[in-house]
Image (spheres, rainbow, N blue to C red):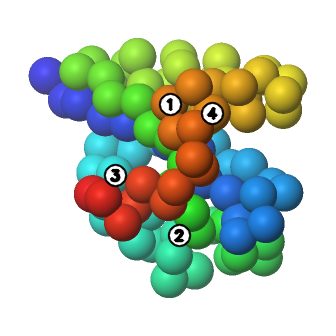
Amino acid sequence: MKEGFVYILSNKNKTVLYIGATRILKERVERHISGEATQFTKKYNINELLCFEYFSDYSDVFVREKQLKKWHKEWKWNLIKSKNPRLKNLYLEL
């Protein structure tokens, strides 16, 4: 069974959020940091990993990603702050 992650990135000023899904979290975040992942994250300099969730079944990853993308921004920030109250860049700890 394939596993995966749903992750939330932001920019330095914490003004924009990006939600994504991947099987290999560290490599995917590195692509965002280098500007190779998406035009949106490159344009807004979104490269800080604030939150991620692990799933043992990759099909659950897509369900959660779609769910989070429909949430209000305030709900997303509440989730991030519940898991990462100091808003540290979690990539530095991977």
Say which amino acid is labelled 4: Lys
- For the question of whether residue 68 can be seen, the reply is yes
Say which amino acid is labelled 1: Lys
- Element type where label 1 sits in the image: helix
First reached walking from the N terminus: tag 2 or tag 4: 2
Find disc 1 in the rendering and name its residue: 83
Q: Name which residue lies at 76% across and 58% down.
A: 14
Image marks 2 and 4: residues in contact by CB distance under 8 Å = no
Q: Residues within 10 Å of mark 2 (few under 14, many from 20)?
A: many
First reached walking from the N terminus: tag 3 or tag 2: 3
Say which amino acid is labelled 2: His
Label 1 – label 2 distance at C-alpha? 21 Å
Label 3 – label 2 distance at C-alpha? 11 Å
In the image, residue 63 sits, relative to residue 26, either above or below, namely: above
Q: Which mark is residue 25?
A: 3
Image marks 4 and 1: residues in contact by CB distance under 8 Å = yes
Q: Which mark is residue 81?
A: 4
Task: Give the foreground label among 4 and 3.
Answer: 4
- For the question of whether residue 37 can be seen, the reply is no
In the image, residue 83 sits, relative to residue 33, either above or below, namely: above
- Element type where label 2 sits in the image: helix
